[in-house]
Image: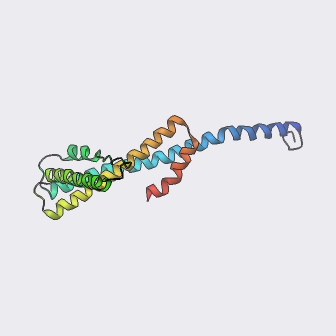
Amino acid sequence: MFFTEQSMAGQIIWALLFFSFILFYPRFMMYKMISEIEVTAEMLEAYARKGIGLIAKVATEKGGYKGDPKPTIERTMDFFLIPPVDLDPYGILAKIEHLMDKTEDRLTGIVDTIAPEGDKVWKANTLSLIKGGIGLNMLAKIVRHYVEFVKKTKNLQIAMMVQMSLPLINR
């Protein structure tokens, strides 16, 4: 009878509960979102590690690489391309084409290093695996960056934006 809605003590307790939920619910939401984003980041990092293992397996079994190709593959996974400045309207396509050609040459050279005895088809498969691995590694790094950024800033809006993108990222 003491904590009913009609008593003054009951109204004070309900008011305190209401304001405590207002204060603590955003923090709870933040920690929940951070944990969901972190699970996705760990999943993507695990996929990237599996990709490195798969590329190493293909390089040793089908490519005839002697030794452990994982250090070379791990260095390759950090490969990125800096696009040209698009303020220059003249010749931007030629610059992009040049960068794409050089990137292809560099990755083909890496494939020739880690799969020296592979035939043309297996080298093409290894090249595709490396390209996919680079993309997956980059995605994992971006999601990890957002996890650390949201943890540091405690910004609820950025956490919500990343959390809303998780289904697309997971797919």
Q: In this view, does 103 lie to the left or right of 169?
A: left
Q: Where is residue 143 in the image (x, y as percent from the top left)?
A: 43, 46
Q: Is residue 139 left or right of residue 123?
A: right
**How many numbered circles does the render carry?**
0
From where the camera sits, is residue 32 visible?
no
- Residue at screen point 22% across, 51% down: 102
- Residue at screen point 89% across, 40% down: 7
Q: Which is more toward the observer, 51 or 168?
A: 168
Residue furthest bottom as drawn: 121
Looking at the figure, which quarter contains the N terminus? top right
The image's colouring method is rainbow
Q: Which is more toward the observer, 117 or 36?
A: 117
Q: In this view, does 114 lie to the left or right of 99?
A: left
Above or below residue 155? Residue 138 is below
Q: Position of residue 65 (x, y in %)?
A: 13, 51
Q: In this view, does 110 lie to the left or right of 164?
A: left
Above or below residue 129? Residue 31 is above
Looking at the figure, which quarter contains the C terminus? bottom left
Q: Where is residue 107 in the image (x, y as percent from the top left)?
A: 21, 52
Q: Position of residue 110 (x, y in %)?
A: 18, 50
Q: Which is more toward the observer, 168 or 66?
A: 168
From where the camera sits, is residue 37 visible?
yes
- Residue at screen point 77% across, 36% down: 16
